[in-house]
Image (spheres, helix red, strand yellow):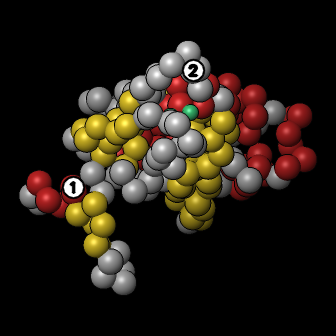
Amino acid sequence: MGVFDDLIKIDENGNVSYAGWVEWKHIPMGLTHCPICLVLDKCWFNNILKPQLPQHEKCHCIVNNISKPKPNINSYAKCDLKKITDYIFSDKYAWNGKRDLFERLGFTIKDSQYLKEEYESQAVKNYCNSNYKLGKLDMQGQRITIDIKFFKNGRYIVLTSGWMVRPKGEITNNTPLAG
Ligand SMILES: [Zn+2]
Ligand SMILES: [Zn+2]
C-alpha cells in the first residue's frame, strides 16, 4: 500500500477518481452568514463524497486537502447508549420490529453497551474508509448513512445506521436503524 492507494480510486468499471480527503472551510463574505455552510465548517469528507460545492450562488466555501482520517486516532464515532437502550430495546418502539430483529439474533438490553461499542467501532472504520452515503443536509448538518453488520448465532444482518458529520473527524449517531 502506497500513498497513491489513498488518493486514487478505481471502481469495478475501471473508472478512476481522486479519492483524497478534504476539510470544508467556510469563508464568510460580507455580512451574511449562511447557516448551512457554517455547520459544514471544518467537517471532513472524502472529496468524491462531499456536499455540493459551491453550495449556492455566492458561496465562498472551499475545501482543503487533508490526509485520510484514522479510526480512533483522529476520527471518532459517538453513539449515545440511550440510542440503543431507549430506542432499539424500548417498549415504545417495539412495533417497528427492530427489537424483534435484535432479539432473534440473541441480543437483549443487557448487550446495549456491547452494541454501542460495536456501532462506534464499525462506523468510524467505515467512515474513514469512505464507506458511507450522503444523506440530508440542512442547518443541523450533513447526515450520512453507514452499514453496520452483525453475525451472531448463525445469523447475519446488515443494518443501516444514520450519523451526523461533526467538525474535525467526528460523527455522532442519529439513529441506529435508519429507514
Ligand atoms: Zn452557504
Ligand atoms: Zn458556502
- Residue 52 at x, y = what percent? 51, 49
Q: Residue at x 53, y 55 (%)?
A: 133
Callout 2 amino acid: His
Quadrant of the image for the N terminus? bottom left
Single out the mark in the foreground, 2 or 1: 2
* Secondary structure state at the residue bearing disc 2: loop
Asked whether residue 150 appears in the rendered view, the answer is no
Report, in whole angstroms, how far the alpha carbon at label 2 lies from the one at label 1. 34 Å
Using the image, determine if residue 131 lies above or below residue 85: below
Using the image, determine if residue 173 lies above or below residue 55: above
Comparing 12 with 52, the one in front is 52
> How busy is the neighbourhood of tag 1: few (under 14 within 10 Å), some, or many (20 plus)?
some
Callout 1 amino acid: Asp
Q: Residue at x 32, y 77 (%)?
A: 15
- Residue 82 at x, y = what percent? 67, 25
Image check: 171 left or right of 179?
A: left
> How busy is the neighbourhood of tag 2: few (under 14 within 10 Å), some, or many (20 plus)?
few
User: Mark 2 and 1 residues: CB-CB less than 8 Å, in contact?
Assistant: no
The residue beneath circle 1 is 6
The residue beneath circle 2 is 33
Q: Is mark 2 within 8 Å of ligand 1?
A: no
